[in-house]
Amino acid sequence: MTIYTRIEPTSPVEGGTGSKQSIARGFGGASGTYDNASRLQKVMGDAMCAELAGAFAPRSVLDLGCGTGWFTRKLLEQYPDATVTGADLSPGMLVRASGGSPESISWLQADAEQLPLADSSVDLIFSNLMIQWSARPEKILRECLRILRPGGRLAISTLLDGTLSELKQAWAEADPGRAHVNRFVPEAQWQGLVKSVLPGAAQVTETIVLPYRSPMHLNRELKELGAVFKGEERRRTVTAPGRFRSMCRAYPTHSDGLVSASYLAGWIYWRKWLPEEGQR
């Protein structure tokens, strides 16, 4: 059964990243190319699936920020007896996700900051590389806290400051004073925020380095993911070819002609306390 519950994503995202509606539209426009470009997303999501494997048997699973449903389907494979729901802000992503997926998966269009789900109604919340697009990640964490059943588990991945540092530096040389790379939360700030909302959460960070044939191929992959620069201060016209060539020249290149991009990855794993255990 397919379920769509519409929450109109019109409120602005603070911090200069545009409206939720524009972000949803951008990712929806990339729904057809996303899966082939999502190398990092698959690495980070697979790490969470491995961490959760065998830990418990949830009755209900929510893939929050499910995108094309890649991991929603994997979660159904991992927990075949569970009720699985994929939720996303982007209707375009949900259309892509529902096509070719098992009929048993439900799909929900919703804002992660105000989920239309009952308190204590989900056993496992899985969220892969979604929360970094919110200017109010603490609201998402509190929503997860609200809907998670006592004894339930939460697994979230995000990107932190230092991500795409090579690209940021190359653009700083090619186009000084103009931002071209999305901003991410500093690691210490993220860890403090998580600790304040989810006491006792396990936090893991790791730098993941992916190879690319050229800065142009990195830029193409970001476009195919819908993860291009979303700041309000971005240029409203197409970047001039000369600036782009200058960025490519400034990008650090290996001796074999390839380039790398670094991603500072963060994961959190948390189990909601049972009433008899008290808050930990």
Image (cartoon, helix red, strand yellow):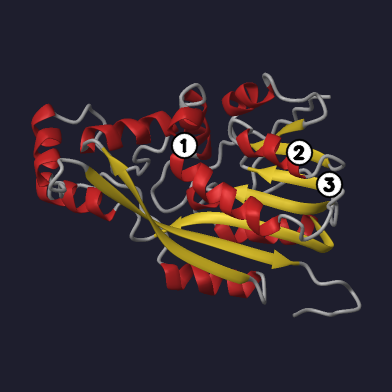
Q: Mark 2 points at which residue?
A: 76
Residue 97 location, x and y as percent?
Answer: 64, 26
Query: Could you tell me which residue is drawn at 41 percent across and 53 percent down?
Result: 15
SS of the residue at dot 2? helix
Of 20 and 35, nearer the camera is 35
- Residue marked by disc 1: 38
Instruction: Determine crowd level at label 3: few under 14, some 14-19, many 20+ residues with C-alpha closer than 10 A.
Output: some
> Looking at the picture, how far across and down is residue 146, in whole percent?
77, 59
Distance, label 3 to label 2, CA atoms, is: 10 Å
Whether 238 is drawn above or below 272: the answer is above
| Dot 3 or dot 1, earlier in sequence | 1
Q: How many marks?
A: 3
177 shown above or below 276: above
| In front of the other: 84 or 240 | 84
Q: Where is residue 109 in the image (x, y as percent from the top left)?
A: 68, 33
Which element type, helix, strand or loop, lies under badge 3? strand
Q: Give the left or right position of residue 127, taking residue 150 as reference.
A: left
Q: Earlier in the sequence, mark 2 or mark 1?
A: 1
Which class describes the residues within 10 Å of circle 2: few (<14), some (14-19), or many (20+)? Answer: some
Which residue type does callout 3 highlight?
Answer: Ser
Q: Which disc, if any, is residue 60?
A: 3
Task: Please name the amino acid that badge 2 sits on.
Answer: Leu
**Callout 1, which amino acid?**
Ser
Q: Quadrant of residue 93?
A: top right
Query: Foreground residue, 243 or 5?
Result: 243
